[in-house]
Amino acid sequence: MTTYYSKDHEWISVEGDTATVGITAYAQEQLGDVVYVELPEIGKTVSQGDEAAVVESVKAASEVYAPIDGEVLETNDSLVDEPAKVNEDPEGAAWFLKMKVGNADQLKELMDADAYKAYVETL
Amino acid sequence: MAESDLTAELLPTPLHDLHVELGAKMVPFAGYSMPVQYPSGIMSEHLHTREAAGLFDVSHMGQAFLTGPDHETTARALEALTPSNFVELKPGKQRYTVFLNEQGGIIDDLMVSRPLSAEEDGRLMLVVNAARKIIDYAHLRERLPENVGLEIVEDRALIAVQGPQAVAVVAAHAPQAADLGFMEAAAMEFDGIDCHISRSGYTGEDGVEMSVPAGAAEAIARALLADERVKPIGLGARDSLRLEAGLCLYGHDLDEGTSPVEGAITFAMQKRRRENGGFPGAVRIQNELAEGPSRVRVGLKLEGRAPAREGAGIQALDGTPIGTVTSGGFAPTLGAPIAMGFVASGHAGAGTEVNLIVRGRELPAEVTEMPFVPHRYHRKQQP
């Protein structure tokens, strides 16, 4: 399993042709207390950069973008009832969705953990 | 989260270093660098204010005095620009009002207090919105009569302490604060420092706002924060607290196109002023009072969990557009989303079912009475 990171602060863990997507610890910290999560419909096809989900804090709504093209296979419905999980375990239990990898080449454009860490330090 | 990066040009308040020391996330707001939240986060800051006491730096707001030869002269000058009664405002009392343009739209909303001491007869203290102070001061300068001056206060900070424990905390340093009733104000000493304290605020809770010398602001804030009942609260929770209290935010819920009748703040218009007029836009406003306005600000309670933010459309159940959300978000005290917005008058009754349009979808909501969370002001018994 390999994990990649986007400049929009999503992480994507790839195993075979399935990928799990969520938001990073940095993103949840910037958002603050998450009060609402909106997930896509299963079977929806998204392109890289499309809005895949919405996460709202007390203060504002933010989009979660699809880091690569693909079809939504599964969503983490537990976040709907317990949105605060996004603050507690953003890079673990609070994954947003699983998708079928539509274009593996796009993963090369993303960052690995070290590159993402360095990127966050520039912000 | 796209905050602008003009940090270098932003003005610091006298409490800036303290905010940074406390770990605040600083953001640009109305030309100032302000704390939007501290490490504990908006939700916990909000709930702490409702349960105990929160300290807010509101030094970005404009403090000024109108100065005239006697109370009646100064009060009449202010009455010419607002729809409120200031001639009969008693010493030591505070009142909420609005500056009106010629069309009866709101230039700003503000608090006015009349000093308690006879030596200060003829002075009225104003507290105006940070983002409007330059406009307000120019508006006043152009219109005040020759014998009434505008004295802008540049050397004082403004600290709000809000919550059920707020007055007990402040009274440990300024005992006279406990004697104030809601919307009363007086000059008093806080640990020997000259302050002006009013029992009012922007959260719906009991509490005070303290105008203090800029040089003493940090010491005063530290003295208050040393009490374990007090936590520092940022602009994020200030906004969610005022929304739950049903209070307007200028530039969002009120603006130059909106009258006090549409804005549902007619409590700012006392009987003599409503009847006699004599303020800018009186024709429109008196007509709206008599006939009802064409649109009015209402509270909205959403059925689901998704918040509706400023700008969301409001539709009748048949899909007819009837208005727009002007403030909306999540209410930490209620654990549910709430909003306020303007709707066409026929749809303003409590219990009216509407849809709020968010990301192209209809979110069911109901028009509701405000405040969303009951006010807990310390009102003195009327004699």
Image (cartoon, coloured by chain):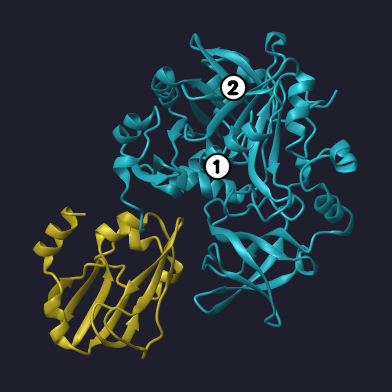
Residue tagged by mark 2?
Answer: B197
Relative to A73, A35 lies left or right: right
Tag on residue B55? Answer: none
Q: Earlier in the sequence, mark 1 or mark 2?
A: 1
Chain identity of mark 2: B
Badge 1 amino acid: Arg
Residue drawn where x is 57% and y is 51% of the image: B251
Disc number at residue B132? 1
Q: Label 1, label 2: how many angstroms apart (C-alpha)?
A: 23 Å
Q: Which chain is drawn using cyan?
A: B
| Numbered disc total | 2
Q: Which chain is yellow?
A: A
Task: Residue at 25%, 57% (x, y): give it.
Answer: A26
Residue B284 drawn at (x, y percent): 81, 53
| Neighbourhood count class around disc 1 (C-alpha, 10 Å): few under 14, some 14–19, many 20 upward | some
> Is B120 or B335 nearer to us in this picture?
B120
Q: Is residue B46 above or below residue B307?
A: above
- The residue located at (63%, 52%) in the rendering is B255
